[in-house]
Amino acid sequence: MRVLLVGVGGVGEAIAVVAQNRPWLEHMVLADYRVDHARDVQSRLGNPSKFSVEQIDAKDKAAILALARKHNVDLIMNAVDPIFNEAIFDAAYEADCHYMDMAMTLSTAHPEKPFDLPGVKLGDYQFERAKQWEEKGLLALVGMGVEPGMADVFAKYAAKHLFDGIEEIGIRDGANLEVRGYAFAPNFSIWTTIEECLNPPVIWEKDRGWYTTAPFSEPEVFEFPEGIGPVECVNVEHEEVLLVPRWIDCQRVTFKYGLGDEFINVLKVIKMLGMDNKDPIRVKGVEVAPRDVIAACLPDPATLGDVMSGKTCAGTWITGTKDGKPREVYIYQVADNDWCMKNVGVQAVVWQTAVGPVIAMELMAEGVWQGKGVLGPEAFDPDPFMQRMAGYDFPYGIREG
């Protein structure tokens, strides 16, 4: 498989690291606007000749299309912030190659009832074009990271093997990670974190469809495995709620994230000051987006591994029935930052996000996962993915009750 990787930030770098020695990978183009950074990543890979470097502006559809054709790629892997999704998604379609992302096209809140009704939903732009992709015989695999991505595979696995009927599928994410030396240092893209945490969260119920609620609503304490312990989780806008109901029969789908009071308070201040705005404003003759200023003032999450400690857990909690009896299961993956830094050389959160798409690339390259149109991870057989996780040092666990 020949891959154009658009974005070589923390997760993009981790994707290259995880994929570098896999026999199915013929070539990967490391494309980033910071070409010196992309070259530095290339130099640290074990097989640098398998990789080439190109400079790219992720909002320039024509440039992405030209690169895809220049390198004759089979797949465009989108590893940048989702504000660029439309350009990359459309470029892949015009280039007649497959597409994968880890976060779908952005939402827009309902203009009158933002905390009751969805406006433009996550992924609407992509699903509206599904028929065109299907007619071309192309696959756009959307939401294929860890959450969404691996978590959706877990949901499909539970529906296939563990339940006869499902009441709720709830993604629950929590960690005990600490970053030394910083008063505030998110371990993932602050741009994406602001987007998903300050937008109205979406919930799906079978008799109601998709609806929204207020940010940070419905707090609950969830007990996470492998020493992480109890973490308070709140509703957050996330793709799984938009993906799972399309392919899995259940009564309710939710996503809750363990943010912590301090993190939530910082996000509320960012919102109050208008610094969450992603549209450029003019400041002393220069146009700049306030959210980009926030991102520029904070440390790059990819550089925090050496000062991070602890574990992060991504997983899918399912309730329902099996053989006429109530059942509750949590399927999860835990990443330990010390292990990740020692064995992979990247921090836990970006590594955990990167492995899922690489496994999906392998399944596509080998023809195990095949499809046409715009599809989520739930559209595919979960077993081959789950079977390959151990081979990527990416084990999963299943907790009953």
Image (tube, rainbow, N blue to C red):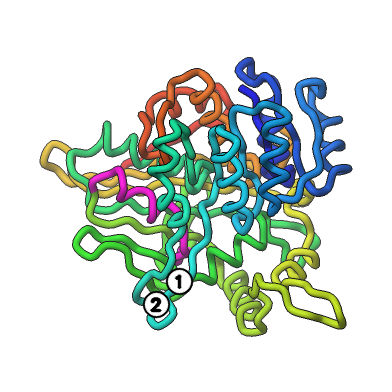
Q: How far apart are marks 1 and 2 (CA)?
A: 6 Å
Whether residues under marks 1 and 2 lie with C-beta atoms below 8 angstroms apart, the answer is yes
**Who's the residue at 52% across and 47% down the image?**
313
Determine whether 203 is above or below 307 in the image.
below
Report the front residue among 98 and 182. 98
Report the front residue among 225 and 73. 73
Question: In terms of secondary structure, where does tag 2 sit?
Answer: loop
Which label is found at residue 200?
1
**Who's the residue at 50% across and 48% down the image?**
147
Give x and y (percent) for residue 19.
65, 27
Q: Is residue 242 found inside the magenta-colored segment of the image?
A: yes
Q: How crowded is mark 2: few (under 14 residues within 10 Å), some or many (20 or more)?
A: some
Specify the quadrant that holds the N terminus. top right
Determine whether 160 is above or below 225 in the image.
above
Which span of residues is magenta-colored?
Answer: 232-249
Report the front residue among 62 and 337. 62
Q: Which amino acid does label 2 sit on?
A: Phe
Is tag 1's residue or tag 2's residue first in the polypeptide sequence? 2
Task: Return the residue found at the far left.
Answer: 324
Which label is found at residue 115?
2
Report the front residue among 137 and 210. 137
